[in-house]
Image: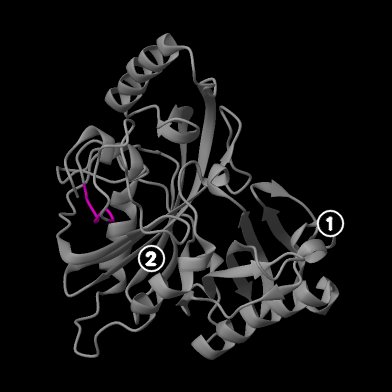
Amino acid sequence: MKQTMMTALAAFVFTALASAIPMVEPVRRCASESESSTSGCSRDYLTSLVTQILDSMVAKDPSTLPLASVYKSTENSHPAALSFMTSWRTITKTSSPSVLALDTTQCSAYFALDIDEGSDTTQNVLRGRVKAVNQKISELELFINRNRGDHGFSFSAADQATNNAALMSPPANRTNPSRATLEALSQALFAKSSDFEVKVSDTCQFTEIGWRVIDTGVYGNASSDPLGCGWPDQHPTDDKARVALVVDEELGFVLTSGLVPGKVYPYNGNISAFIPNQMTAAQDQQDVWIKTVSAQGNVSLLAPTQATGDTLELLQYYDDKLQAMQINVYLSGPNATSVWL
């Protein structure tokens, strides 16, 4: 990853990552052994369950799903019964998931795919996490990203499947991580400090909502090459991050969720970018840029606006190195929290 301020901005900046120093504060585990159920749970079962969910959306009939007597569900961070959700109203076509992480210990899965909502030419991105207990859906967390503004900077439904293909077909001779290693990686992600030292593969793929991020810089003079992965010391943190939501030892995936307060700034003319509040240098740089451009008097700029990034971040780790980083964000208002906490 290029070590420039503009690169730090685009990479989410969105890179909610952790430093390699002794841990001083624990990160909240989301799923305990007592909460999980492995009864009848296999990779085939979880794959079939995700397929059932997607098929029911196209059929606009959530009543076909095996729901628990009491279940918890959200769509774009707000709670609703499935029959009240947009996904079962507007989705007309789904592809097969281009990324699928399966956790048979917690009986949970993470999936992402492109969808149609009444248009064969414009696709959107559906992301979801499902958990089952005794083969009944107990949790369903969904997000639909429709354009770059939903995430704060990045979006590409068209590139998602191509970019995910490598993640779903890792080398056959790889050394898989232990579950404990993936859990430690997840705990380090939003921690203020961590003793888990992360090595990054030279070929590590970095994407945000399907797009391999290219940062042109606020003045349009930065690199045109996709950014790589990084694990910097300066990063957004969340003491209440939900860690190890899905742990897939076979493919090396681990899913983590954190809430990141920040501000949406105008960026490089008529676009915008979400910058976490903890990245003060990047925000200061944008303030300077706004003053410079505003003085020219010929450009309309978005007013800097407070927001919260609700993230589901997927990491892939094998051969003792970080192999892929997917930072997936859905923006909401300032000081937002999560019903999942």
Q: Toward the viewer: 148 or 79?
A: 148
Badge 1, how many Cα within 10 Å: few under 14, some, many 20+?
few
Which SS does the magenta portion mostly show?
Answer: loop
Q: Nearer the viewer, mark 2 or mark 1?
A: 1
Above or below, 76 relative to 238:
below
The picture places residue 113, in percent across and down from the top left corner, at 56, 70
For the magenta stretch, what is the residue range? 226-231
Q: Toward the viewer: 294 or 99?
A: 294
Name the residue located 56 percent from the left edge and 27 percent from the top edge.
335
14 left or right of 175? right
Above or below, 35 relative to 24:
below
> Residue 227 magenta-drawn?
yes
The label number, if any, that marks residue 254 in the structure image: 2
Q: Secondary structure at mark 1?
A: helix
Badge 2, how many Cα within 10 Å: few under 14, some, many 20+?
many
The label number, if any, that marks residue 225 in the structure image: none
Q: Residue furthest top?
A: 295
Q: Residue furthest front?
A: 298
162 left or right of 124? left
Q: Amino acid at mark 1?
A: Phe
Q: Secondary structure at mark 2?
A: strand
The picture places residue 267, in percent across and down from the top left corner, at 42, 31
Residue 164: tell me if it is visible: yes
The residue carrying mark 1 is 84
Name the residue located 48 percent from the left edge and 80 percent from the top edge.
104
Q: Amino acid at mark 2?
A: Val
